Image (cartoon, grey):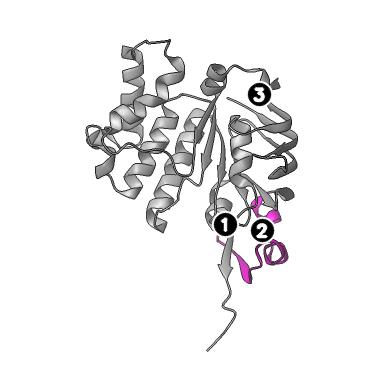
Amino acid sequence: MTELSLHGVSAGYDAEPVVRDVSVSVGTGRWLAIVGPNGAGKSTLLKAIAGLVPWQGSVTLDGTPADSLSRKDRARLIGYAPQNPVLPERLTVTDYVLLGRTPYLGLLARESRSDLSIVDETLDRLDLDALAARKLGTLSGGELQRAVLARVLAQRTTLLLLDEPTTGLDVGHAQTLLERLDQLRREDGTTVVTTLHDLTFAAQYADELVLLDRGRLVSSGKPAEVLTTERLREHYSADVEVLTTAEGHPVVAPVRRIRP
């Protein structure tokens, strides 16, 4: 189980940072969703935590500076799934998920019986058993997203970083994926950080939100605290109503600007 803390983190690809001076903490076993308009720096912040882009500031995992960890040790603590992962069409689901065991293999070593057992268990938990021998190129969008999640879960890390895990999914498949993720998080005590475009889904599943705009943190806290009509109008240039479900979760509903 991992507690994640960022202090004064700036990150980017060139001299000008995309993300500037972000500070936030995520408690062990909690779910943080990073939201914001297009180009706000959400994916860049996630990549900075994963150590995939240059960054400055402080990133700690259970108090240990992330930049003091070797690449292999980091991969054993952090599971990262990009928004558009490389999915070799001719690779089977089993072989793809087995890639998640790479951080535990020595140079030129083959997977062990234990690695294969972990993959089998992961496929079972995500109801992918029947698809184990199928090639990735034959899967539907929802099945592919489950396979991507399975590969990350097979790493057996205590921190999951998922960049837009519901991309390309309809509302039913997106809900199913997020429900599975939430269940696995609760069972394993895993800390989860996601980026999500859908603000209502973010409010339904995440414990806390971070709102970025133009690379800066403009609000953080409980979903109901972050998702206000005024704030969404300012940072998304959107006319919306923020409604509330029977369970108290915010629902962001766009309001039609031009009426017939």
Q: Nearer the viewer, mark 3 or mark 1?
A: 3
Gap between marks 3 and 2 measured at Cα: 31 Å
Give the image quarter of residue 231. bottom right
Q: Tell me if residue 205 comes above or below residue 132 in the rendering.
A: below
Give the image quarter of residue 149. top left
Earlier residue among tags 2 and 1: 1
Question: Which residue is under mark 1?
Answer: 199
Where residue 76 appears, as percent x and y from the top left, is: 52, 20
Question: Which residue is under mark 2?
Answer: 227
* Rendered image: mark on residue 30: none
- Region rendered in magenta: 222-249
- Amino acid bearing label 3: Ala
SS at circle 2: loop
SS at circle 3: helix
Residue 86 visible = yes
- Amino acid bearing label 1: Leu
Q: Tell me if residue 17 comes above or below residue 104 in the rendering.
A: below
Q: Depth check: 188 or 108 in front?
A: 108
Earlier residue among tags 3 and 1: 3
x 31%, y 13%: residue: 113
- Amino acid bearing label 2: Leu
SS at circle 1: helix
* Rendered image: mark on residue 66: 3
Residues under numbered marks 3 and 1 in contact, where contact means CB atoms less than 8 Å apart: no
Q: Is residue 185 shown in magenta?
A: no
Quarter of the N terminus within the rendering: top right
Q: Is residue 33 left or right of residue 167?
A: right
x 62%, y 57%: residue: 37
Earlier residue among tags 3 and 2: 3
Residues under numbered marks 2 and 1 in contact, where contact means CB atoms less than 8 Å apart: yes
Count neighbours of disc 2 (C-alpha within 10 A) and say few if under 14, some if 14 to 19, many if 20 or more.
many
